[in-house]
Image: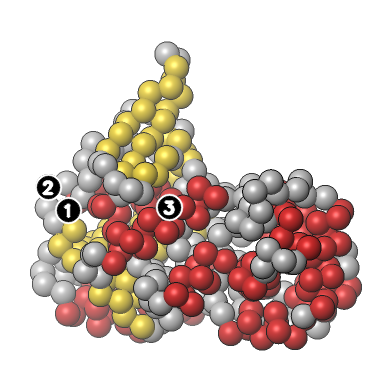
Amino acid sequence: MGLDDWAAGDRADLAAVAEEARRWADSASDSPLYRAFALAIADDPALLAVLGRIPGVPPMNLLLGAVKLHLTAADALAAWYPHLTQEPRRPGPEACEALRAYVLDRADALVAEASARRTQTNEVGRAAVLLPWVVAFARDEPVHAVDLGASAGLNLCLDRFAYRYPTAGPDGVRETRLGSSSVELVCEWRGEGPPVSAIPMLASRTGIDLSPVDATDPDAAAWLEALVWPEHTDRLARLRAAIEIRRGVDVTMVAGDAARTLAQVDARLAPGPMVIWHTIALYQAPARVNAAIDAAVEAIARHRPVLRVGMEPVSGLPHSQVRVGSSFDRGRTAATAHAHGRWVAPAYP
Ligand SMILES: C[S@@+](CC[C@H](N)C(=O)[O-])C[C@H]1O[C@@H](n2cnc3c(N)ncnc32)[C@H](O)[C@@H]1O
């Protein structure tokens, strides 16, 4: 899953950090502001030196998240951020100059903030990508849901969200609608037939994370908001609504590496089918951790029905891959999806 694609191993090698920044710009095509920032950083040795001081992955998310967290309406750079101004300016060279001045003025503080944080973006739009596979597995029976790399566990409330799947066909656009909720997810279904006909029943909800996020803590919630890309005001609104829903739902959050804790979680749950999912999470884990997770899933599948569905970036591919199987790397590609769940394109055998 290409961890090296997201962070140059040698952080002092500015040419490698510049390559990392350019690759990140490609993945940020739906944020013109961040794409412009990333490309400007890639060509700026002083900014690359700052980026090179950030050890976590992806460093660009952490740096731009730290900027967004601290930015106030009084800063010149705020003119490009929709959450701080009514009429944001269009991205361009002046925005990049303002970013440069902002970052270089407070480089030490931003590096300290970014180094103390993780990329834990909790994106509920990904629930719309998971739902068709979870429903097909659950049928009429409640299933235990386990989210690996769950962040704040928002996607474990996927049965509390509403869904709209518009599908373009020869007779125009048809739409499958499910549920009613303050969080309504719109996900273009680029395939045949309605994607889902029901919302699954969950027997239990468990989120595993190296560092679970308590979204009721104002500092943690502010960081989750800072990780949302500036132009994505719809994502920000539904993040806030999802946090409200999450407050009323019983989710067990387990702190630890999924490679070590998954078997313990399984041992504590009552018999019954289990769906294990992970979205844009295990790309952050090294290969040996992913191999250990595969082995844990295989062991669980020996004593209960299991569906593992993963949605992760894959080296060399432009969009997230949705794969089904006991191993993500060796799993069957079931679909390609937008990283924030704006569309899903099923792969038919
Ligand atoms: C980018 S966030 C995605 C969160 C959530 N899955 C989503 O799609 O909204 C990735 C999360 O995976 C967690 N993570 C990464 N490696 C992990 C591991 N080996 N075990 C458990 N959690 C892990 C991180 O701490 C982080 O919260």
Q: Does the residue labelled 3 lie within 8 Å of ligand 1?
A: no
Q: In this view, does 324 lie to the left or right of 252?
A: right
Mark number, residue 41: none
- Mark sitting earlier along the chain (2/3): 2
Residue 342 in the image, given as x and y percentages of width and height: 49, 43
**Which quadrant of the view contains residue 147?**
bottom left
As drawn, 325 above or below 74 = above
Mark 2 vs 1: CB contact within 8 A: yes
Q: How crowded is mark 1: few (under 14 residues within 10 Å), some or many (20 or more)?
A: some
Residue tagged by mark 2? 140
Residue located 42% across and 35% down the image? 189
Tell me the kind of residue under disc 2.
Answer: Asp
As drawn, 20 above or below 115 = above
Q: In this view, does 218 lie to the left or right of 147?
A: right
Q: Quadrant of the C terminus?
A: top left
Residue 117 in the image, given as x and y percentages of width and height: 56, 80
- Mark sitting earlier along the chain (2/1): 2
**Which quadrant of the view contains residue 195?**
top left
Between the C-alphas of marks 3 and 1, the distance is 22 Å
**Which quadrant of the view contains residue 244?**
bottom left
Residue tagged by mark 1? 201
Tell me the kind of residue under disc 1.
Answer: Met
Residue 333 in the image, given as x and y percentages of width and height: 44, 49
Between the C-alphas of marks 2 and 3, the distance is 28 Å
Residue tagged by mark 3? 238
Q: Quadrant of the N terminus?
A: bottom right
* Label 2 secondary element: loop
User: Does the rendering let one see residue 179?
Assistant: yes
As drawn, 36 above or below 149 = above
Between the C-alphas of marks 2 and 1, the distance is 8 Å
Q: Residues within 10 Å of mark 2 (few under 14, many from 20)?
A: few
Tell me the kind of residue under disc 3.
Answer: Arg
